[in-house]
Image: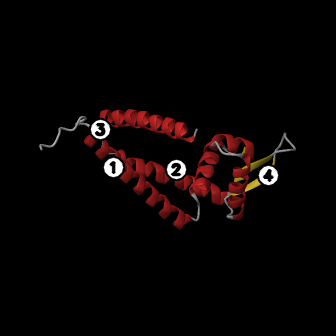
Amino acid sequence: MADSPDPDPRGAERTGVLDRVLHLATLVQADMARFQEETGLTAARTHLLWVLGAAGPSTQAALAAALDVSPRNVTGLVDGLVASGHVTREAHPTDRRAALVTPTAAGEAAVAELVRSHAELADQLFGGVAPRDLAVFARVLDDVTATFARLVEEAAR
């Protein structure tokens, strides 16, 4: 009996692309693990520092909203960053109930290094990509990310 033709000849192409995306995710995870080992900063603490670097001193409530996590989760992250010397909690100048999370000199240095290494990696990965190709890649990546986020949300219901 002859093999029946694939009802969707693009199916193999799609799964091949998914395999490459999954490989990229594995590489990103490995790089993040290396970064954590070198710096002692978890991905979540790094993300908080990144947000703090962009926003400046912030309340924990503002950080929780920016990170889309619970205030309790932010408390744990800030506790860890206080212990590692990356941030301090200071009295809020106008709200006695709130504290400002403020980067220390070590925190500011970490943020500056994050910004530098982020720009360097972007240049290494995409510096040789034609602007038109990069725009198409960005659009497709946005579409795929939105679709995946929707699928994850639907699966959680």
Q: Assign the N terminus to one quadrant of the image.
A: top left
Relative image position of residue 45 (x, y in whole percent):
62, 55
Q: Which residue is mark 1?
A: 19
- Mark 4 and mark 2 lie on one chain; the one further toward the N terminus is 4
Q: Residues within 10 Å of mark 3 (few under 14, many from 20)?
A: few
**Residue found at the very far left of the displayed protein:** 2
Q: Using the image as rendered, state which of residue 144 and residue 91 is in the foreground.
A: 144
Residue that appears at 69% across and 60% down:
80
The kind of secondary structure element at disc 1 is helix
- Mark 2 and mark 1 lie on one chain; the one further toward the N terminus is 1
Amino acid type, callout 2: Val
Q: Which residue is mark 2?
A: 115
Q: Give the foreground label among 2 and 1.
A: 1
Q: CA distance from mark 3 to mark 2?
A: 23 Å
Q: Residues within 10 Å of mark 2 (few under 14, many from 20)?
A: some
Q: Would you say the residues marked 4 and 3 are in contact, meaning their CB atoms lie under 8 Å apart?
A: no
**Residue found at the very far front of the displayed protein:** 1
Q: Quadrant of residue 27?
A: bottom left
Amino acid type, callout 4: Glu
Determine whether, in the image, residue 130 is placed left or right of residue 123.
left
Q: Which residue is mark 4?
A: 90
Q: Would you say the residues marked 2 and 1 are in contact, meaning their CB atoms lie under 8 Å apart?
A: no
Determine whether, in the image, residue 111 is placed left or right of residue 92.
left
Residue that appears at 53% across and 36% down:
154
Q: Which residue is mark 3?
A: 130
Determine whether, in the image, residue 55 is placed left or right of residue 4.
right
- Mark 4 and mark 3 lie on one chain; the one further toward the N terminus is 4
